[in-house]
Image: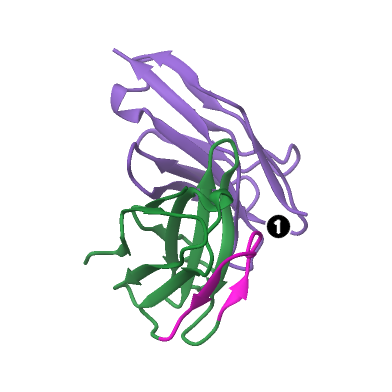
Chain colours: A green, B purple
Amino acid sequence: NAGVTQTPKFRVLKTGQSMTLLCAQDMNHEYMYWYRQDPGMGLRLIHYSVGEGTTAKGEVPDGYNVSRLKKQNFLLGLESAAPSQTSVYFCASSSGTSYSNEQFFGPGTRLTVL
Amino acid sequence: GDSVTQMEGPVTLSEEACLTINCTYTATGYPSLFWYVQYPGEGLQLLLKATKADDKGSNKGFEATYRKETTSFHLEKGSVQVSDSAVYFCALDTGFQKLVFGTGTRLLVSP
């Protein structure tokens, strides 16, 4: 099992450009999440999904969109990148059951917006 | 809202020293509590968890006890190793499958 994978690993964008980050999991998990990690702020939830075809806003959703067309994939889009979106982005997944709510994380994508 | 507060780092220790990283939380209801660890260049991975008051989570020599009366979940290890150098995150889940993380504490262990 590969677990949770993310592509790309690194990306540099110019202000105003768009991009999509891809997250894939092979554990048949229902729930998937996108976080951003910034120095001194821990991880903050951007968007999440409780199943195929569903998405919901997290703590810091502005400037991002997501889609969950297939159960195993969760895409994070930036339509018009801004320097404030420079961060490390982590995807995670969990089974969604009450007593197995461990989240499994991908290795992260380091995004720099110039 | 729900929140997690953990001690600022870095925490610098010599090998075989004792470790305590403090974590306190504010939450409505009865959250599950977690410690996640992030090794350099990697994503987070679960270290241990506790789902109700007085539960003790343990793994790889690390322990944490869910203290409802003090709303705390401090991470402890009796003898740290260089390989324990990482960033440690305390987190809570109030039952909606969403985690609230602390800011992280970097641990540096020297030989």
x, y (%) of residue B72?
67, 38
Residue A50 in magenta stretch: no
Chain letter behind tag 1: B
Taking A30 as reference, is A114 above or below it? above
From this viewpoint, is residue B21 visible? Answer: yes
x, y (%) of residue A19?
42, 67
Taking B111 as reference, is A43 above or below it? below
Report the number of discs: 1
x, y (%) of residue A65?
55, 73
- Graded by Cα atoms within 10 Å as few (under 14), some (14 to 19) or many (20 or more), the crowding at tag 1 reads some
Which amino acid, mark 1?
A: Tyr
Residue under the image location 61 percent in, 28 percent down: B7
Q: Which residue matches tag 1?
A: B30
Q: Quadrant of residue B6?
A: top right
Q: Main secondary structure of the magenta part?
A: loop
From this viewpoint, is residue B78 visible? Answer: no
Taking B42 as reference, is A106 above or below it? below
Quick one: SS at disc 1? Answer: loop
Numbered range of the magenta stretch: A55-69
Residue under the image location 21 percent in, 67 percent down: A1
Residue under the image location 53 percent in, 25 percent down: B20
